[in-house]
Amino acid sequence: MSHSDRHTQTSGSDTLSEAYPPHLDAPLDLDGDRLREECGVFGIFGHPEAAAITALGLHALQHRGQEAAGIVAFDGKRFSSERRIGLVGDHFSSRGVIERLPGNAALGHVRYSTTGETILRNVQPLFAELDTGGFAVAHNGNLTNGITLRRELIKQGAIYQSTSDTEVILHLVARSRKGRILDRFIEGLRQLEGAYSLVVITNKKLIGVRDPLGIRPLVLGELDGHYILASETCALDIIGARFIRDVENGEVVVISESGIESHKPFPPQPMRPCIFEYIYFSRPDSIVHGRHVYEVRKNMGAQLARESGVDADVIVPVPDSGVPAAIGYAREAGIPFELGIVRNHYVGRTFIQPTQSVRELGVRLKHSANRSVVKDKKIVLIDDSIVRGTTSVKIVQMMRDAGAKEVHFRISSPPITHPDYYGIDTPSREKLLAATHSLDEMRRYIGCDSLAFLSVDGIYRAMGEEGRNNARPQFTDHCFTGDYPTNLTDLGGDATRRQLSLLAELA
């Protein structure tokens, strides 16, 4: 979660440019105003090439976190660990690294930090030697009582090596008085709040668990008779593994030489998976809870066209996230789909811009207008979300500079009005454009001719539901509704001020 936004923005038509300066002269980076991916986990048990397969699985999950990657392996006698800042391919593609990770069990993680900055001691999987043997854990999600638990454990004498909320789990397991490692782990789980998918390896087991609401995803697969746990099915596809099923909400899956066991240590609750897995986070070729993500995103675009169609000549996606929804919108509206913005995939994030003249040229390094598509046309831009809105300003201006006659903006999700505390890096509420401005204020700030979002009920219809069941919502959708499904212990009282105070302790 973001904790650097400490000042309050004002709203209202007289303060739009002051509150949200467009900075049109800044380099155009469509990745800079996005929801940040969460994390990805991958574990395999019993395979002689466990570390190499884990590295391939992490490649497929790279979209879930690009800041760091790590693998822990076990060869029956000792654990080996390799953790690096940066991309999987930059560190885990060489034979030498994989050879330093011997064994037939391995656990991997790709990271985008939501709690704890990206330094090597925060890179997962985290490992500890317990009295029961080695214990390594990889975590996707965010604990909403992690800082509170951390405070209590430190008062009791715990010595922390990281600022990650994941380390809380190690301490809870280490301090349990239960006999079996599984019982100790479950006792620790019962003290956690928030969203989490965890994968653990011990001396004898691979263990996976989802939080009681199933907010974060986890799937079970099989390769050559060996079981796999992963964040998404695309990680199974890359290695030719067979998808077995989703791990259920609140389920603990235990894999050992004896086979696979399922435990249900929590009171049963209806599942509420995060709806942003379908909107943005999961790879388009993944299947999440039986739904093909690519098809769902096209359905969102089609529903958006039904709700807020507009007379136009061409439908243009904001690459790459807006492409499936734009296809669905174009098909439903009967308007041609065209690539009016071209993305250069070969430009990295660290391009050096030493002079003003080069910075000005750098505006179009990553994205440029396809002038032949948009010139003298009424266009509909399709994107999946608006966060701060600064990127949207630049996109619209780029289309106008390319000669577009009209620019209509359509968003294939509802307005984001509340921050996330479950593993997505969203700004504080005063930095969310839709939380502080009316629809017309947003339209004028962005500079488009019209602006519309998919409705909350519309996104549920795109998922195959009749609408949102307000009495028992089918998904975790708090970013749109403010309906947080778990306790937010770390944010008690004045949420924003308390959040900043607690996070400052980790700085």
Image (cartoon, rainbow, N blue to C red):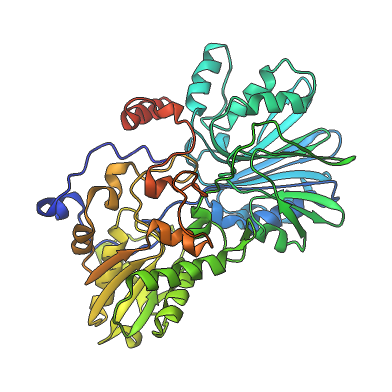
Name the one closer to the observer, 44 or 74: 44
Q: Where is residue 244? Give x, y as percent.
A: 76, 55
**The quarter of the displayed image where residue 305 is located:** bottom left
Asked if 186 appears above or below 123 in the picture, the reply is above
Estimate the x, y position of residue 414 in percent, counting from the top left.
37, 57
Q: Which of 259 and 340 is in front in this view?
A: 259
Which image quadrant: the N terminus? top left
Query: Is residue 335 positioned above or below 450 on the image?
Result: below
The answer to whether residue 96 is visible is no
For residue 347, above or below residue 404: above
Residue shown at the point (47%, 50%) measured from the top left: 469
**Among the 4 quarters of the image, the one containing residue 6:** top left
Quadrant showing the C terminus: top left
Residue 371, percent from left and from top: 32, 84
Q: Residue 197, how many percent across, how many down? A: 62, 41
Looking at the image, the residue that sits furthest to the top is 156
Residue at 55% x, 48% y: name it.
273
Quick check: can you spot residue 16?
A: yes
Q: Residue at coordinates 21% horizontally, 67% vertically from top-left?
A: 447
Q: Which of 399 and 313 is in front in this view?
A: 313
Number of callouts in the render? 0
Placement of 353 over or under 274, stated as above or below: below
